Image: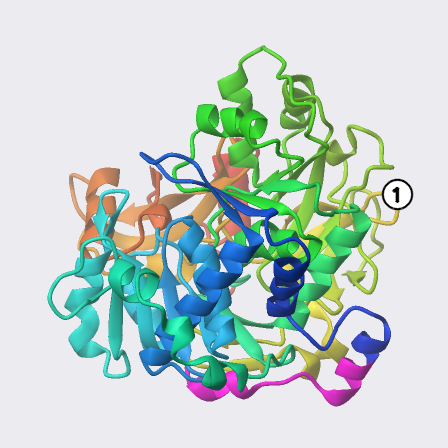
Amino acid sequence: MSVSMYSVRPPHAMAKQYRAGGYWRDCGPLDDLRLWRDRTPDAIAIRAYRSGEAPRPISYGEFAHHVERFAGALYELGVRPGQAVALQLPNWWQTSALILAVARVGAVLVAVPTNIRSRELERVLVGSGVSVCLTVDRWEGFDHAAALREMAPRLPQLRHRVVLGSPAAGEIDFARFFEETPWEQCHPVALNDVQEDPDRIIAVYFTSGTSGEPKGILHTWNTVHSTMSTWVGGEECGPPDTLFVPNTLVHLFGAMMGLFVPLLAGASSVVLDVWSGPTGLALLAESGTTQFISTPPYFFDLVAAAGEKAQHLPDLRILAASGTTIPKQLVTDALHVLGVPLRSQFGMTEIGLGTWTRADDPPDWAMYSDGRPGPGTEIDLRSDTEITGTEPGRLFIRGPGVCLATVGRDSGTLTVIAERDDGWYDTGDLAVPDGRGGIRLAGRAVDRIGGGFMIPVTDVEFLLQSHPGVADIALVGYPDDKGGELACAVIRPATTPPVDLEDLRKYLSDQGMTDFYLPSRLELLPDLPRNTLGKVRKELLRRWLRGEADLTDA
């Protein structure tokens, strides 16, 4: 990748169209923060829950102060407009403030979840041209600071490593440098000269995408804002609301629904660093959450924690599950236990929030639909044959929330969405009409595995192909019991006795592969089914793993 990718801007005609429609604006979330800082400085912006510490409420006035201080610290480290700053941090209140501080200095956020390990992290930092990286010392048993320290000599553009926790020699102590030093008093003029430009690239979010090949997704404040404002307006969000989104803030979904939506509405956000079903259930009541928005596994955890007992949650008014088709039983169980109908959302890193079910839909509509698009967003189902309720089409989306561009993590190939197919984005999903102006997802047209996060299939297969015990390999998704997918390695073994699952997983881990990419199931075959062009028939393998097909069908 090249940092010149950050210079991509929307075509003038498109920007004019979306501004005229009210989907884009001339400011960004920093103006939202200033609005609530001035109007309601004592209102709670963040209810921070950090493991082992007492809950910490942070007012809008305090939050705005921290953003200015952290921005001053970044400026002191030499960060200037257009440069890239990486965050790989847990869900702490500091993470929320740092996301906005990066914007305050006009830099580009490179968002890296904490479950990304060394191999992928180094590629991201190299390709993104990161000059400053902020990370945690240790998290969930992994030494992030040590991993960054080891690769630092191979990262000539990386000038500073900032550690939240216990830094080593050569690393900057976040608490001392960012939190305890009044940098906001040192650079006010320089920072005020930074203009908030809602049409410039402000963040890169990495995903394996629709083909299994990792890529960076380039968003502006306006592409993010359009889907935020759609939700805020459609669901009448305002200062009385408290949103609880347990997903990571260093990913588009978590940041959009857990930081930018509350900021736009003047609402509160619940920030929790260590999730469990019992903890989440307790915080729903304790925090007065009005909207709980997440992915299906979190809802399964809540239901399991509650057991058969219905919860008394008088403030809760919206439950929404995003990222993948919701199992029907979860819709029933969530309503019974939490007392509010479970809504369905369909979204992707590339498009933000694409569709969702509404309050005026039947209470169980999430069993049958993934919703309809909001204002300004168009959907198109395409097929060479007639599309019916049982015959899906390929789902395309166009609208103000679609990212400006994607860039190959390793190849650096830049694809500007507006320059292809009149701005239509191919989601790689199959869908059928739901009968109410929306869609129901019906599978994947391309090779993707995952739920909230996608597994880069090509990367994993490439590494496994080099294992001495593997003669042939296909990584295929199979359903878990929480509405997502896990990876199964289907291999033709090269040795006797054949390789086992633990050996494969250790082989990948030893090369720095991220934990959740690792296969959790192994199937051995004498030969992999292939079509006449020699390509592995993964659609047949998927059905075989689900018990819906026999390999003699090959």
Check residue 7 for magenta coloring. Answer: yes
Q: Which residues are magenta?
A: 1-16
List x then y, in percent, for residue 134. Answer: 32, 64
Quarter holding residue 417: bottom right
Foreground pick, 467 / 283: 283
- At horizontal 20% and vertical 46% (from top left) the residue drawn is 506
**Image quarter of the N terminus:** bottom left
Q: Is residue 160 left or right of residue 74?
A: left
Q: Is residue 75 left or right of residue 303?
A: left
Foreground pick, 213 / 512: 512
Residue that carries the numbered disc 1 in the rendered image: 435
List x then y, in percent, for residue 470. Answer: 25, 52
| Residue at the extreme left of the image, as rendered | 169
Dominant SS type (magenta): helix
Check residue 486 for magenta coloring. Answer: no
Foreground pick, 223 / 175: 175
**Image height check: is 473 above or below 71?**
above
In the structure shown, which secondary structural element does the residue marked by tag 1 occupy?
loop
- At horizontal 31% and vertical 53% (from top left) the residue drawn is 514
- At horizontal 65% and vertical 54% (from top left) the residue drawn is 261
List x then y, in percent, for residue 346. Answer: 67, 49
**Image height check: is 433 above or below 361?**
below
Q: Is residue 230 left or right of residue 114?
A: right
Tell me if I can see residue 139 in this picture.
yes
Quarter holding residue 352: bottom right
Which amino acid, mark 1?
A: Gly
